[in-house]
Amino acid sequence: MAIEPVRSNPIDSRPWTFYVLGALFFAFLAFLYGPMFVIYVLSFQGPEGGVTFPMVGVSLEWFRDIARKGQMANIPPAFGRSMALAALVSMLTVFMSVAGAMAFRRRFPGAGLIFYVVIASLVMPSLLVGFGIGLSFQFLGLQPSLFTSALGAQLTWTLPFGLLAMFAVINRFNRAWEEAATDLGATPFQRLRYVTLPILLPGILGVAISAFTLSYDEYARTTLTIGSHNTLPLEIYALISSATSPTLFAIGTLTTLVSLGLIVLAVTFVWQMDRQRHARRGNEVEAPGDA
Amino acid sequence: MATMRASDDSGSAMMRHDETAVVTARARPGNGRRTGSTRVWLVSWAQVGPLALVLLLMFVLPAFLFVVVSFFDYDRIGVYPAFMLENYREVLTSSATLRVYLSSFKFAAIVWAITLLLGFNIAYFLIFHVRSATLRTVFFILCALPFFTSAIIRTIAWIPFLGRNGAFNQFIMGTGLTSQPLDFLLFSDFSVVVAYVHLYTLLMIGPIANSLSKIDKSVIEAAWDAGASRWQIMSNVVIPLSKTGIALGSVLVTTQVMGDFFVVRQMSGGQSASIVSALSNEIQSMQYPPAAANAVLLVIIVALMVACMMRIVDVRKELLK
């Protein structure tokens, strides 16, 4: 039996699979962004152009079309409603899922049951959740509306998401920080306020942004629970069948910009915070958050 | 590792005063039962209460209601309390039900296989091959960004891309590969699968990457030093250790496909229906009891699928580890 040459470590070397998987990854990114890029480009279609290539000039015609009275009249107020609802959903999701994830760090009676309800809520076909809520409101004689039934329907989607995300965040959290705080005499509240929450903040912000965009883009749960005033995705949905102009693409470009803007804002914020923390750590040696 | 931490906890907790013991017990798993005080439970319940209450009111009770309504009688004017199995008999014996379920299972299976293959390999690349933490974060954000934009927009984005005169056909005709535009690209099973994969691959990447990142690199080195080949490391170490992520991703992707009501309707060009889009037609025509019976059937099937996948791994234990 020949003595094998010293084998390079699988983690330190660059085997052929690295190049194959790298190529796959970039092909996936092209697949992910390619078609979306097409609609972003087409939204700047010239006034004479249609919904496919070639571009007949370049214009902002279709963006102007959104603000114009007529077919698009419902878009601006629907956008406002979507933003308001998403902000509320985001706040409630952060509050409830952070608190909930804290609870799940210990055993408590009912934890298993609540966990399975959360999973069920996550995997339940979206439209059925809305159907159930719509039926309930009808049986109780209540009018479905933005901040009652639609809010509830969206929370059944964002809460499980937020809770599972917080589990992942808390898993990476080193409990030694909390123990150190307790050993130094911090009360439970001080420990939460000055140690736990600041360390978890990037994750919490991630949950907030996720919940916001999940709500902002949600349609299947909302459609049967919204009542008479549509949110933006429902307006877009209604437009798909009737509108055959690049206006739809222009709306797509705008809503994407809103989502992206939020994410950029969040990433910048986390990055800034990280830098500040590092700067502070450089100057003085003390427990985190001991300000 | 988990047992080590637990024993460490019990040692340090015992050394403290009673009051501190309660406080530290709250911060740690596994201690609540031993210190056993109702006060600790009350804190837990208070923390999880708002979430549980919302899910009770907006998920559990409404779901219970449509189970009840599925037994009700109805006509063109209204819905009448009753206990009849007629709605179920109709749903279960109609050939439309069978057809739409078979079509959904088909899509779920195809999309599951593709997203698993793609998702696992991409997650593996990001965790094991990309060495710079910054670059990895950037790549992750690139994968996740589209998920934060409207699913409707992402679905219809394929129409100008795949259509007869779409960007893809123009491109391949430009290269001279074909002289005729390819018709099967849009409003076909193909375009439905493409849209699903586009929408849901991230749901696979996320959980699998989370599992992979928890694998201790020294375990892989140990396997390598013991003479395992790359494939052996993959099949005996990496895949078994990432099964939580695989299971969770599979649950998310297949349930999304089974519960879809937009993609099939939009991308198949009316050629096939999904379970939920058929159901939403019944809701629109106010036929609530048969719609509810349909919903109950779908929920049972989805629950069985999830239960099967959860049997493979204890997702709860793994997530909270």
Image (tube, coloured by chain):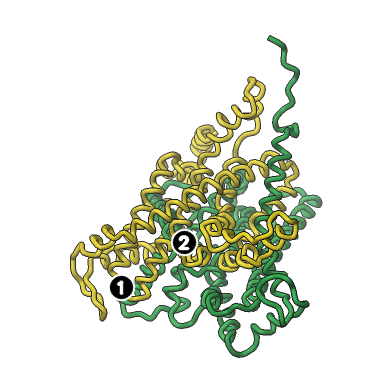
Chain colours: A green, B yellow
Residue B266 at x, y = what percent?
A: 51, 67
Whether A56 is drawn above or below B242: the answer is below
Whether A52 is drawn above or below B131: the answer is below
* A147 relative to A139 in the view: left or right: right
Q: Which label number is shown at residue B287?
A: 1
Q: Count residues near mark 1 (Cα–Cα under 10 Å), then give few for <14, some for 14-19, many for 20+.
A: many
State the residue position of label 2.
B260
Going 46% across and 42% down the picture, which residue do you hit?
A: B317
Q: How far is the residue under mark 1 from the one under mark 2? A: 20 Å
Going 68% across and 9% down the picture, which residue do you hit?
A: A1
**Which residue is situated farthest in the right direction here?**
A283
Q: Give the amino acid at mark 1.
A: Gln
The kind of secondary structure element at disc 1 is: loop
B136 or A223: nearer the viewer: A223
Q: Is residue B149 visible?
A: no
Residue A15 at x, y = what percent?
A: 73, 33
* A15 relative to B9 in the view: left or right: right
Q: Count residues near mark 2 (Cα–Cα under 10 Å), then give few for <14, some for 14-19, many for 20+.
A: many
